[in-house]
Image (cartoon, grey):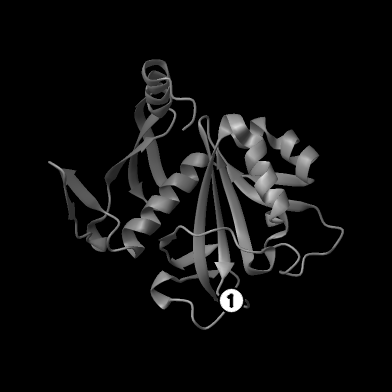
Amino acid sequence: MDIVESKQISEPIKSEAQISHLALDIGGSLIKLVYFSTNSDSSSSSKDSVAVSSGNEGRPVLEGKLHFAKFETAKINDCIDVIRSKQLRLSGFQKHGAPAGEKCTIKATGGGAYKYADLFKEKLGICLDKEDEMDCLVAGSNFLLKAVHTEAFTYMDGQKEFVQIDHDDLYPYMLVNIGSGVSMIKVDGPGKFERVSGTNVGGGTFWGLGEAFNKVQEF
């Protein structure tokens, strides 16, 4: 799926009839769910809209919004219940002309895409089409830096200052991904990157310390 323009939107999950392009990132601490919903009426705000294409020149570009939701990985059944109740597993499958007998698949990345593959098949009857996590991370970062002018900024002394990105001088850059652990990736160009360092001390450690010192039970 090629995204022409992106903007993060926080809205309630809509009906299945408006939704397509569901994908998951199943990490060690959190499950991140993203889906695309088409505009249901002409009153939808254009500044909040995105345009996506399947990559097939014969298909029209769709306009709509990207939606994000997160769940604790330890409570993966909550994520499964939402996908089932909103019929998100059918999103972008039947509407795009897939044969009725063809297996239903959704894109997924992260270690949980392997660990919980059988659970998703048992509970929802879907197969997780696994993508490489680093490939997705770098491709997404490259896209955001090129397409969203307010994506890059510095934050010092409580002040945020946006940074103008020169698309002709974007590479190389260092991408630091902070999840349950931390990975440091040198990006030299589209599809050209290498992991140069990292540590298992990251968000998982922070979460564990927060639970220990503050008796926090939820993310």
Q: Is residue 184 above or below residue 205?
A: below
Characterize the local packing of mark 1: few (<14), some (14-19) or many (20 or more) Cα atoms within 10 angstroms: few
Residue at 53% across / 34% down in the picture?
Answer: 27
Residue at 33% across / 61% down in the picture?
Answer: 146
Frontmost residue, 10 versus 1 = 10
Name of the residue lying farthest toward the top: 212
- Relative placement, left or right, of 125 versus 74 is right
What element does badge 1 sit on? loop
Image position, residue 126 (x, y; %): 75, 47
Frontmost residue, 25 versus 80 = 80
Q: Is residue 1 above or below residue 212?
A: below
Image position, residue 3 (x, y; %): 48, 65
- Amino acid type assigned to the residue bearing label 1 in the image: Ser
Residue at 37% across / 24% down in the picture?
Answer: 206
Image position, residue 36 (x, y; %): 56, 63
Q: Which residue is mark 1?
A: 40
